Amino acid sequence: MIRTILIIALIFSIHISNGQSINVGLFNKFNVKTLVFKPLKGTFFLENDNGYKEKIKSNDVIYITLVGDKISVWGLEKHLGLSESIAITPKKEQALFSLEPAFPALPKRRYEGSLQILIHPDDKLTIVNAIGFEKYVASVVEAESGVRATHEFYKSQATISRTYALNHIDRHQNENFSVCDDVHCQVYKGMQTQNSKIKQAVDATRGVVITDKNNQLITAAFHSNSGGYTISSEDVWSAAMPYLRGKQDPYWDNQHNSHWTATIEIDDWITFIEEMGIKLPEKYNPQELFTFHHPSRTRNLVIADQLVPLKQVRNHFQLRSTFFSIEPQGNQLLIKGRGYGHGVGLSQEGAMKMARMGKNFEDIIHFYYYDVQLINIDSTTYLLRLLSQ
Ligand SMILES: [Zn+2]
């Protein structure tokens, strides 16, 4: 059963990487009811499910609004009909358009590819952008890691983003698209600067994904900075994944997110730990009881011989990581922390440092993911070998 799923996923992957598109749900965390479409380059065709068809030219502005159980479309001068779905397709591939949600008002973004608009079961517009898969990967790399890194880092980030997308390709199946454009899946902001360094790195790794030794696409988890130790997946999530093992990370220091501090009022701390079921002694010295140090990562904090999961502390007080010490000072606790993010898998700042030190993207991937392989999903040899097993 698992092998069948993998084979289907790989066949699908091969289609995708050979110039296929991925369907991305845009603005999906918002309840968008009105959307403004403007062509920026090229001509488009708008078509609804009643067979209505209209050409959209430069300087046209199209207003798309959910009215009751229908999508209403207005051009500048005329009503373009009511329907349950509309499709906007470019005449030529390189066409560019902008989308600006007007209700609620959100920043305008630029997109390539085509657009399909449907009615979401939650009484809002479902906005789906079909975009070439490798262009999607380039956009995600820019959104997730900015434009100031080096070639080998971008190659590792492109490989991770490609793997992550293919591994989550059916995540929003019930909503009529594959992945959303938010951190829930991967951040996708359409066509941004289209940075040439990122494009080169995406092209250089075209079709390359990370699998475990059983040829399964891995969950390519990453975070900003490990603080000196990455953490095993089961210490953060429920599943123990053999390739997501905690390890010492010598590439963490002297970076933007290496160190942080925070303060917590002792009264807030006591309320929190009592809510967590911790029984405090009748008399105690906060200085002694609440002091906490852990030189390497652990899963729990110990207070009066009782355990408090560090993950809960991080979530409750919105701390940057679960890797910190606590020093009581008067009515406050001084929190001195290391790293940023969940700490599982690849550290982006560590990967950037490795790339600056001359390591290549294979070195980076194999350092942060244990016992994995890099394969090219364009490789039919690989698929044939798999099918004949
Ligand atoms: Zn999502």
Image: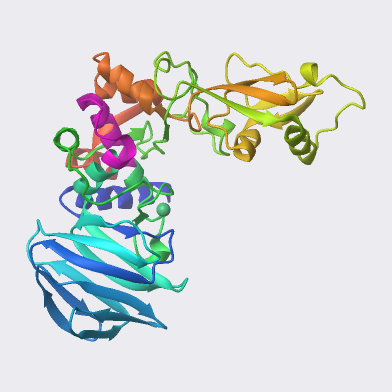
The image shows residue 175, relative to residue 185, as above or below, that is: below
Q: Is residue 308 left or right of residue 231?
A: right
Q: Position of residue 305 (x, y in %)?
A: 80, 23
Q: How is the image coloured?
A: rainbow
Q: Position of residue 327 (x, y in %)?
A: 68, 18
In the image, 7 versus 132, the foreground residue is 132
In the image, 244 versus 225, the foreground residue is 225
Q: Residue at x 33, y 46 (%)?
A: 165
Q: Residue at x 38, y 46 (%)?
A: 3
In this rendering, does residue 389 appear at all?
A: no
Q: Residue at x 37, y 31 (%)?
A: 213
Q: Is residue 48 rendered magenta in the image? A: no
Q: Is residue 148 left or right of residue 168?
A: left
Q: Quadrant of residue 207?
A: top left
Q: Quadrant of residue 377?
A: top left
The image shows residue 322, relative to residue 90, as above or below, that is: above
Question: Predominant secondary structure in magenta?
Answer: helix
Q: Work out which residue is located at the far front of the displayed protein and give it.
A: 330
Q: Position of residue 203 (x, y in %)?
A: 15, 37
Q: Is residue 148 rendered magenta in the image? A: yes
Q: Residue at x 44, y 49 (%)?
A: 184
Q: Quadrant of the C terminus?
A: top left
Q: Which residues are magenta?
A: 142-163
In this rendering, does residue 141 appear at all?
A: yes
Q: Is residue 85 left or right of residue 43?
A: right
In the image, 381 versus 257, the foreground residue is 257
Q: Position of residue 33 (x, y in %)?
A: 38, 72
